[in-house]
Amino acid sequence: MTDDLGAAGLRFERDGAVGWCIIDRPAARNALTPAMYFGLKRAVRLVNTDPELAALIITGTGDVFAPGGDLGGRSEPGDAVLPDLGGADILPFLTIRDSRAPVVAAVNGICQAGGLLIAMMSDVAVVSDRATFRVPELLRGIPDATYAAVLPAHVGLAVARDLLLSARRFDAAEALRLGLISRVVPHDQLREAAVQAVGEILQTGPAARTHVKRMLNERYGLIDYQTMFWSLEQSPEPREGMRAFMEKRAPEWVPDQFADDRSAGSKGRP
């Protein structure tokens, strides 16, 4: 299998038994195209089928890990033609979750939307003390089914409601306190700490580890992709939310009294 992940915004590098999938699309602040989402699935498949590889680390570049999908709908020259799959089959989150080979997220900076799901679904998220987080989907009118299913399992129902319904930003210290992630390290120690986490996981029995992961994953709720993708195709809210984001204004559904507050949610990529 080739190390080419079929996405111009992803690089795959080898360091002994560890594969590194590096999100590297600085011109778009590492926003993920469909090809990049599917390329992450290819990276997981690669470490699970290449006998020279034992684990995967996913990280970003600069001050951004991953802010989620590119709301502008853009792609990049060099992106491979995607297979004819449904929308849910493009997404990498369950593939990351179910990987037999360990997957560690080395969160180097801004981590939001699909980027935060990548971190949550990894076996361990090792996080820079400079990282920031957000769950902004509802600001765009998107009923994200993966978050609704998995976030309560990580942080409890009350905190999940808070993070999903407020879409507020929070820092690495709060993410650690809430149980959203498990390790925060000084920024300049991130790479070393991620490799250390991989080494710790690889000390455990692969078959036993797979069974434990399956039992842990049973704690997640049902992922209602049918509602999510129906809304993306049929509801006017995602289209208005994306227009508002691109135009840096509050969506139509925000009362005038709060429009200035909500327009702040349209600044910067989700």
Image (cartoon, rainbow, N blue to C red):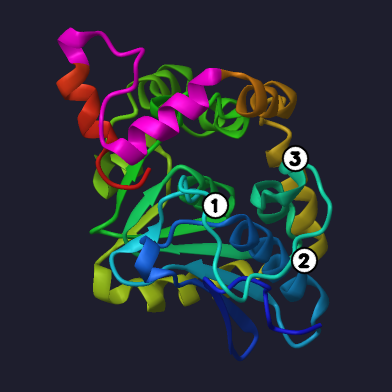
Work out which quarter of the rendered image holds the N terminus and state it: bottom right
Q: Main secondary structure of the magenta part?
A: helix
Front position in the image: 114 or 187: 114
Residue shown at 18% from the left, 23% from the top: 261
**Magenta region:** 236-258
At which x and y percent is residue 61?
Answer: 37, 72
Q: Earlier in the sequence, mark 3 or mark 1?
A: 1
Q: Is residue 168 above or below residue 195?
A: above
At which x and y percent is residue 170?
Answer: 26, 39
Q: Earlier in the sequence, mark 2 or mark 1?
A: 1
Where disc 1 sits, the SS reads: helix
Residue carrying label 2? 206
The three-letter code of the residue at mark 1 reads Ile
The three-letter code of the residue at mark 2 reads Pro
Q: Is residue 134 above or below residue 182?
A: above
**Disc ID at residue 215:** 3
Q: Residues within 10 Å of mark 2 (few under 14, many from 20)?
A: some
The three-letter code of the residue at mark 3 reads Met
State which mark lies toward you, 2 or 1: 1
Q: Is residue 265 left or right of residue 155?
A: left
**Disc ID at residue 118:** 1
How far, Cα to Cα, is label 2 from label 1? 22 Å
The answer to the question of whether label 2 and label 1 lie on touching residues, with beta carbons closer than 8 A, is no
Q: Earlier in the sequence, mark 2 or mark 3?
A: 2
**Quarter of the figure with residue 256:** top left
